[in-house]
Image (cartoon, helix red, strand yellow):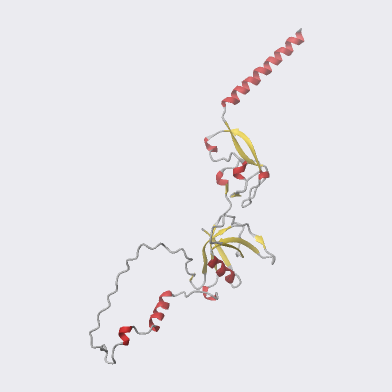
Amino acid sequence: MRQTRTALAALCVGLAVFFALQSISSSVATKTAVTATRAIKRGQTIRADDLKTVQIADSPALANVFSSDGDVKGLVAQVDIENGSVISRPMARASPVIGHGLTTIDVKISGSSKALIPGDKVSLVGSGGCASLPDAPDQNPAANRQTEADTEPANASDASTTGTGEPANGQTPTEQVEEPDTDVGTAPSTATPPTQSDGQTCILASQATVTGNPHRDESGNVTTMLAMPPRDAARIMAAQERMPILAAKL
């Protein structure tokens, strides 16, 4: 009887502790959170087997935490994520999508390109003047317009005057009045701006999007895949054989 009473007392104490813990846990709100099952490096694409969901105590500080592994799969890590870390929205973003009218090329970027990850916006600058490019545009548009004006033939009114400066038909020439430009409703041009150069550097692309992590090509060169308009791509393909190309993060 003594042993039975002792066992029943221990059972009652255990049940009391169990129900007390259940009462405490039920009063604490929890939420589903996505955590990393392994270390994920910055710039890597997150896979399904890198993730698992757990229940954690809810808090206003966890408002940006992902609650479904499907929302995280396929995103690009923006920071190094440690094993077991809870993944929040600022830590990952969607992979870049190539828009209509853009093309992608591998660009040999001088210096360290490891800091660039998919989705970054950069401008590409050549370390030499644009004059070294085979299709370089005129870098002095004002002088070019002046040269064109000097080489234009005389207008019809000049051609009809006599050698004394008087009109051939005897009429007094009328003064040409320039009409003001009133066309202010045209949409802004979407064409790529002309190449700009200061003699030492050359802006090859004002904006390009990184679409892949740096990798080695068949020749052993470290290249980065970027998306940009075809005109910029053609210019860079010609330039990277003549000058080093630098990337400035926007």
In front here: 126 or 143? 143
Q: Position of residue 113 (x, y in %)?
A: 61, 60
Residue occupying image coordinates x 53% and y 67%? 231
Q: Where is 157 relative to 124, above or below?
A: below
Tell me if residue 243 can be seen: no
Residue occupying image coordinates x 63% and y 36%? 54
Q: Position of residue 244 (x, y in %)?
A: 59, 69
Q: Position of residue 183 (x, y in %)?
A: 34, 65
Q: Where is 72 relative to 250, above or below?
A: above
Query: In the picture, residue 160 is in which quadrant?
Result: bottom left
Left or right position of 3 against 77: right
In front here: 167 or 21? 167
User: Which residue sits furthest front?
Assistant: 169
Residue occupying image coordinates x 36% and y 62%? 185
Tell me if residue 224 can be seen: yes
Q: Quadrant of the N terminus?
A: top right
Residue occupying image coordinates x 62% and y 46%? 73
User: Which residue sits furthest bottom?
Assistant: 163
Left or right position of 219 against 68: right
Q: Position of residue 98 (x, y in %)?
A: 56, 57
Q: How many numbered callouts?
A: 0
Query: In the picture, residue 87 is in which quadrant?
Result: top right
Query: In the picture, residue 222 is in which quadrant?
Result: bottom right
User: Which residue sits furthest top?
Assistant: 1
